[in-house]
């Protein structure tokens, strides 16, 4: 009998505790290899593929596409192929006495040199070695040592591999008994006995809507109460609840039914406060949840100020046209502005910093040797800010290529947490939305963000005469704790002058 292994959803890093299952790449009965992608999950940061640390046959898929899974919850069960072969072939030659308990990768009491033993040993070595592929903090060992079991295996007289108990209460809501769970992959664990509810989100949802979890049947594995169970209970009309609770049928309507009407009307789609019909309820999750949390923290912690200036961008537009006439590949306007920003941050490094607060409440300004330039990008999943690492070392053409690449992977949901969370200064081109300006919110924990509005024809005075010029608006929002208005205005004027006279600045870069 082969020993089923349960792979738990690994630690996704960046403080993330859950992920939405987007799709499965495998099905029950499929044969998979070590490090083969088995599923695609979407976190609040990005969409990633999860590789399997085990090889074998898929025995069970724990979750449906669209379901939100907690870190540490079973993801997939795999039955090793060669484990069953080796066990069946070795059974007649096994000693009558029970062998010593072994650990993962340790010796087993089986005649050496048999084909089954060699195949089983090769299988174990493959799992121990892995490829070293990393999934946001998770990966197979890949030469960094072998993960050890927290419980030992022993071979029964029937020749099947069994496991010792994990711990008291582990069977409640956890993997099935006899399943082999590698606890080195269980980064998040609920202390003590696992009950019918694991997710704190489910408990909070039930508490806020007055749902009694003790009376709620769970639809998950082993009776586990899922989010969908609580949502179903919330959406159940209050009239049905009263009918179930009534001890005896009565001939006349019960007079106590009136107090429950407000909740009943709200559940049926009418808002109790406004009296309007509720059109929809959209959960705040994923990228939208992260954006909301980050923006709220920025506004509550950062004393921000905003300065802006109108800029004549005609010179920059004419420069691009000259480059195009030469047949060369011309960077986009945003790439040129990004090049000016990195030069400006070199002159005004106060805006390329971060404020850190110690446990005792003391604060310090952290400066950086380099610029990771964040580029705000609107995607179907929400606003994300991938960053160009070491942007100060790149030319305008190199910046253009990297900005296009990052924007593309961000819109596909493929940007890595490193690309999304390592910025030191943000550049936001909201002119693509047809607006002139915006008092942007700083991307915490950065201390400044530069916005660029649309470029339009406007009347402009040039050498004492009125002319039609290409004009845009630059807006800088900055953390007043790291610098005063003079520094912010100096930086903004530097960028404006570079846009108005790009050839002069580019000659010095």
Image (cartoon, rainbow, N blue to C red):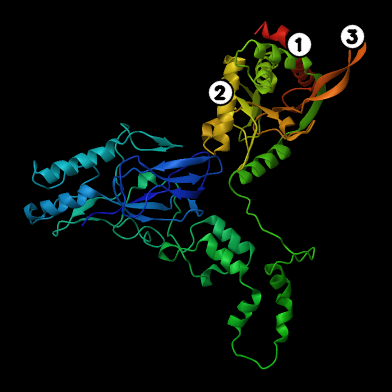
Residue 504 against residue 292 in the figure, above or below:
above
Image quarter hosting the C terminus: top right
How far apart marks 2 and 1 lie (CA) works out to 27 Å
How far apart marks 1 and 3 lie (CA) works out to 15 Å
- In front of the other: 171 or 277: 277
Q: Residue at x 70, y 29 (%)?
A: 429
Give the left or right position of residue 146, taking residue 378 as reference.
left
Please identify the quarter of the rendering in which residue 305 is found: top right
Residue 435 against residue 203 in the figure, above or below:
above
- What percent of the width, then of the height, locates residue 461? 90, 15
Alpha-carbon neighbours of circle 3 within 10 Å: few (<14), some, or many (≥20)? few
SS for callout 3: loop
How far apart marks 2 and 3 lie (CA) works out to 41 Å
Q: Nearer the viewer, mark 2 or mark 1?
A: 1
- What percent of the width, then of the height, locates residue 485? 80, 22
Q: Are marks 2 and 3 in contact (CB under 8 Å)?
A: no
Q: Residue at x 67, y 33 (%)?
A: 443
Q: Are marks 2 and 1 in contact (CB under 8 Å)?
A: no
SS for callout 2: loop
- For residue 389, which numbered disc appears in the image? 2
Counting residues from the start of the chain, the first of labels 2 and 1 encountered is: 2
Please identify the quarter of the rendering in which residue 303 is found: top right
Residue identified by numbered label 1:
501
Give the left or right position of residue 503, taking residue 51 as reference.
right
- For residue 463, which numbered disc appears in the image? 3
- In front of the other: 70 or 473: 473
- For residue 316, which numbered disc appears in the image? none
- In front of the other: 409 or 87: 409
Counting residues from the start of the chain, the first of labels 2 and 3 encountered is: 2
Please identify the quarter of the rendering in which residue 245 is found: bottom right
């Amino acid at each position: 009998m082969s020993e089923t292994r349960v792979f738990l959803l690994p630690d996704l890093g960046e403080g993330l505790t859950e992920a939405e299952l987007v799709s499965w790449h495998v099905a029950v009965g499929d044969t998979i290899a070590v490090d083969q992608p088995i599923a695609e999950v979407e976190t609040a940061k990005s969409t990633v593929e999860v590789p399997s640390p085990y090889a074998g046959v898929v025995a069970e898929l724990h979750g449906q596409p669209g379901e939100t899974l907690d870190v540490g919850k079973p993801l997939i069960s795999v039955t090793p192929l060669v484990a069953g072969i080796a066990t069946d072939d070795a059974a007649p030659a096994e000693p009558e006495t029970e062998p010593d308990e072994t650990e993962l990768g340790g010796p087993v009491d089986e005649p050496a040199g048999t084909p089954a033993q060699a195949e089983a040993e090769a299988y174990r070595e493959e799992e121990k070695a892995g490829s070293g592929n990393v999934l946001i903090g998770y990966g197979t060992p890949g030469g960094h040592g072998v993960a050890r079991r927290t419980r030992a295996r022993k071979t029964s007289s029937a020749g099947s591999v069994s496991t010792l108990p994990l711990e008291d209460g582990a069977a409640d809501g956890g993997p099935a008994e006899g399943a082999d769970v590698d606890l080195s992959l269980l980064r998040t664990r609920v202390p003590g006995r696992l009950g019918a509810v694991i997710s704190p989100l489910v408990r909070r949802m039930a508490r806020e809507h007055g749902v009694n979890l003790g009376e709620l049947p769970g639809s998950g594995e082993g009776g586990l109460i899922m989010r969908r169970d609580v949502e179903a209970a919330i959406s159940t009309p209050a009239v049905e609840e009263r009918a179930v609770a009534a001890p005896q049928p009565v001939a006349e309507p019960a007079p106590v039914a009136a107090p429950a009407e407000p909740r009943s009307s709200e559940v049926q789609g009418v808002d109790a406060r406004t009296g309007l019909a509720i059109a929809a309820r959209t959960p705040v999750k994923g990228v939208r949840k992260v954006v909301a949390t980050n923006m709220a923290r920025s506004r509550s912690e950062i004393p921000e100020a905003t300065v802006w200036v109108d800029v004549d961008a005609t010179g920059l537009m004419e420069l691009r046209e000259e480059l195009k006439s030469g047949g060369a590949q011309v960077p986009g306007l945003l790439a040129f502005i990004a090049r000016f920003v990195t030069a400006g941050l070199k002159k005004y490094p106060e805006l390329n910093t971060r404020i850190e607060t110690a446990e005792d409440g003391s604060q310090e300004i952290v400066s950086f040797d380099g610029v990771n330039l964040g580029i705000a990008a609107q995607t179907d999943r929400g606003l994300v800010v991938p960053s160009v690492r070491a942007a100060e070392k790149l030319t305008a053409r190199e910046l253009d290529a990297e900005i296009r690449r990052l924007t593309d992977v961000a819109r596909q949901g493929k940007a890595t947490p490193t690309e999304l969370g390592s910025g030191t200064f943000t550049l936001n081109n909201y002119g693509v939305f047809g607006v002139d300006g915006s008092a942007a919110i700083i991307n915490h924990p950065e201390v400044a963000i530069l916005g660029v509005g649309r470029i339009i024809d406007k009347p402009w005075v040039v050498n004492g005469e009125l002319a039609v010029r290409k004009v845009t608006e630059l807006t800088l929002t900055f953390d007043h704790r790291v610098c005063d208005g003079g520094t912010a205005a100096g930086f903004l004027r530097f960028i404006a002058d570079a846009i108005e006279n790009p050839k002069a600045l580019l000659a010095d870069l």
